Amino acid sequence: MSNAWGIPEWLEREVRERDKFCVYCGVELLESVPRGCSRKNVATWEHIINDAGIITRENIALCCSSCNSSKGTKILSDWLNSQYCKNNGIDKETVAPIIQKQF
Ligand SMILES: [Zn+2]
């Protein structure tokens, strides 16, 4: 069994348990959008290295949809220099440990 992103159920459970907060900006993640609220804090699947073929606990993480749409297909280190990250105070020191391991 795996979800729509090809992530096996055991890994999905493990990552959901680990990433309660966006791995990038640290916002508390929501499972679904509360009525009348914005989607930006909803948990989305993120491939840290943007390769859908790398399905490991080191490369799969949960981040908010706002960070996910900003990062898109950018390389992590490039994205951390983006205006979005500057505006939100996101850098190598503020991201989750799973992301810091990339450096
Ligand atoms: Zn975020």
Image (cartoon, grey):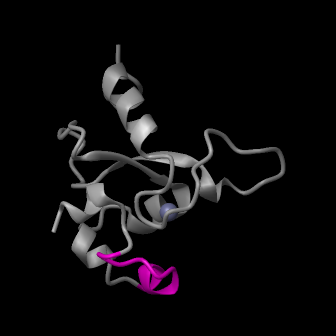
Residue displayed at 51% across by 85% down? 87
Q: Is residue 70 magenta?
A: no
Check the image and report above or below for 17 versus 92. above
Figure quadrant of the C terminus: bottom left
Say left or right for 90 vs 41: left
Q: How many marks?
A: 0
Say left or right for 40 vs 52: right
Q: Nearer the viewer, residue 26 or 46?
A: 26
Q: Is residue 84 magenta?
A: yes
Check the image and report above or below for 100 versus 8. below
Is residue 89 visible in the rendered image? The answer is yes
Q: Which residues are magenta?
A: 83-93
The answer to which image quadrant residue 71 occupies is bottom left
Q: Give x and y (percent) for residue 10.
A: 33, 22
Residue displayed at 62% across by 45% down? 30
Residue displayed at 21% across by 48% down? 51
Residue displayed at 32% across by 76% down? 93
Is residue 8 visible in the rendered image? The answer is no
Q: Give x and y (percent) for residue 49.
A: 21, 55
Q: Give x and y (percent) for residue 16.
A: 45, 36
Check the image and report above or below for 27 versus 7. below
The answer to which image quadrant residue 97 occupies is bottom left
Q: Residue furthest right?
A: 36
Q: Give x and y (percent) for residue 75.
A: 23, 67
Figure quadrant of the N terminus: top left
Q: Residue furthest top?
A: 1
